[in-house]
Amino acid sequence: MITLSVVFIWLAWGIAVGSGFVAFLAVLGVIPRLTQLTKTQKSLHLYEVAVVAGAIFGSLISFHDLVLRAPVVLLAFIGLFSGAFNGMLAAALTEVLNVIPILAKRIGIDGKIIYLLMAIVLGKIAGSLFQWIYFVYL
């Protein structure tokens, strides 16, 4: 039986996590920087609405054991857009924090940042394919 104190703790936890997520995006300026990189500053409000709607939808989905029975083409379409969003968000975050130039300088490949970027991209592709083939398909 769920008591009132448990509900209060869950609510407080949700507010803390949600506030942390919003603070993360607001302080680092990830969404405005993402609109600058994609040259879609006029759609800033749509990005904000999409992030909030995605967070709410993701929270609601996590309460249920949802099984999406859909054609493979639709699932691939959803996966493509999810991956594009996560990739662009990660790219905007690294751009805001200047992670790649700092990392290149630390490991001594200042003039060869393209190799570092290609290693990151190919590693992400290999990891995604491994996860998909090994854990999902088999």
Image (cartoon, rainbow, N blue to C red):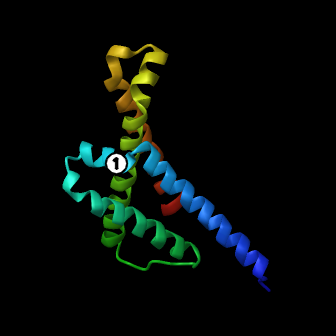
- Residue 100 in percent (x, y) is at 41, 28
Q: List the single residue furthest toward the bottom.
A: 1
Q: Residue at x 27, y 49 (%)?
A: 35
Q: Which residue is drawn at 35% across and 65% down?
A: 50
Above or below for 12 versus 29: below
In depth, the one of 94 and 125 nearer the eye is 94
Lateral position of residue 127 relative to residue 32, left or right: right
Q: Which residue is drawn at 48% across and 62% down?
A: 137
Please tell me how crowded label 1 is: few (under 14), some (14-19), or many (20+) other residues with Cα within 10 Å.
some
- Residue 37 in percent (x, y) is at 25, 42
Above or below for 69 versus 23: below
Q: In which quarter of the image is residue 7?
A: bottom right
In depth, the one of 40 and 19 nearer the eye is 19
Q: Where's the N terminus, which quadrant?
A: bottom right
Q: Can residue 19 be seen in this view?
A: yes
In depth, the one of 97 and 62 nearer the eye is 97
Residue, disc 1? 88
Q: Is residue 138 visible?
A: no
Look at label 1 and name its amino acid: Met
Q: Which secondary structure lies at badge 1? A: helix
- Residue 123 in percent (x, y) is at 44, 38
- Residue 85 in percent (x, y) is at 35, 55
Q: How many labels does the image show?
A: 1
